[in-house]
Image: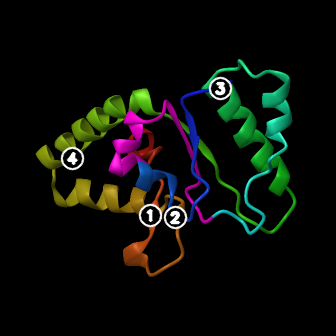
């Protein structure tokens, strides 16, 4: 039996679960979408893989779930995003983001602000509300700044 994995088929985005962080004390992996999940939800055919190998680890199962989800919606008009987040790495991510923000604050000039604003403008946006309440995926920001 796989333990320590928790799927989150909800309307909340994957990043929101990470921001609240108590989930990291309950599971080893978070599987969630950055976008509202399409109407059909998850492709539950991954359960056959789990039944065939009930001792697989959470990372392996998470990859199967995410891969099958993307294939399930391939060719449709639906936007399909699903992430498998290793919750043991959250502190490292938060520390790296903190260092990036500290560096940005130390050199917060009109030039760096314009560069950061351009990167933000060019990132993929999730949500769909007004520009003020959308989330953006800044994962590539340090590499393009």
Q: Secondary structure at mark 4?
A: helix
Marks 1/2 in contact by CB < 8 Å: the verdict is yes
Q: Residue at x 34, y 43 (%)?
A: 22
Q: Quadrant of residue 39?
A: bottom right
Marks 4/2 in contact by CB < 8 Å: the verdict is no
Numbered label attached to residue 135: 1
Question: Label 2 belongs to which residue?
Answer: 125
Give the distance between the C-alpha atoms of the residues marked 1 and 2, in whole angstroms: 6 Å
| Viewer-side label of 1, 3 | 3
Of mark 1 and mark 2, the one earlier in the sequence is 2
| Viewer-side label of 4, 2 | 2
Q: Residue at x 72, y 40 (%)?
A: 65
| Viewer-side label of 1, 4 | 1
Q: Point out the image quarter for the C terminus.
A: top left
Give the distance between the C-alpha atoms of the residues marked 3 and 4, in whole angstroms: 41 Å
Question: Label 4 belongs to which residue?
Answer: 104
* Residue closer to the observer: 87 or 1: 1
Left or right? Give the position of 72 relative to 56.
right
Of mark 1 and mark 3, the one earlier in the sequence is 3
Q: Secondary structure at mark 3?
A: loop
* Residue closer to the observer: 17 or 122: 17
Name above or below for residue 102 compared with residue 134.
Answer: above
**Residue 27 at what x, y percent from top left?**
48, 34
What's drawn in magenta, residue-wise?
18-36
Structure colour scheme: rainbow
């Amino acid at each position: 039996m796989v333990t320590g994995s928790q799927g989150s088929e909800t309307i909340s985005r994957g990043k929101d679960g990470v921001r609240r962080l108590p989930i990291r004390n309950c599971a080893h992996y978070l599987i969630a979408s950055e976008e509202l999940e399409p109407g059909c939800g998850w492709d539950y055919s991954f359960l056959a893989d789990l039944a065939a190998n009930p001792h697989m680890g959470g990372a392996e199962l998470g990859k199967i779930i995410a891969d099958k989800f993307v294939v399930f919606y391939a060719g449709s008009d639906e936007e399909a995003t699903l992430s498998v987040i290793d919750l043991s790495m959250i502190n490292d991510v938060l520390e790296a983001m903190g260092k990036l923000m500290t560096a940005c604050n130390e050199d917060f000039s009109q030039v760096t602000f314009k560069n950061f604003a351009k990167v933000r403008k060019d990132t993929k946006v999730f949500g769909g509300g007004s520009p003020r309440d959308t989330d953006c995926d800044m994962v590539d920001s340090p590499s393009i700044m």
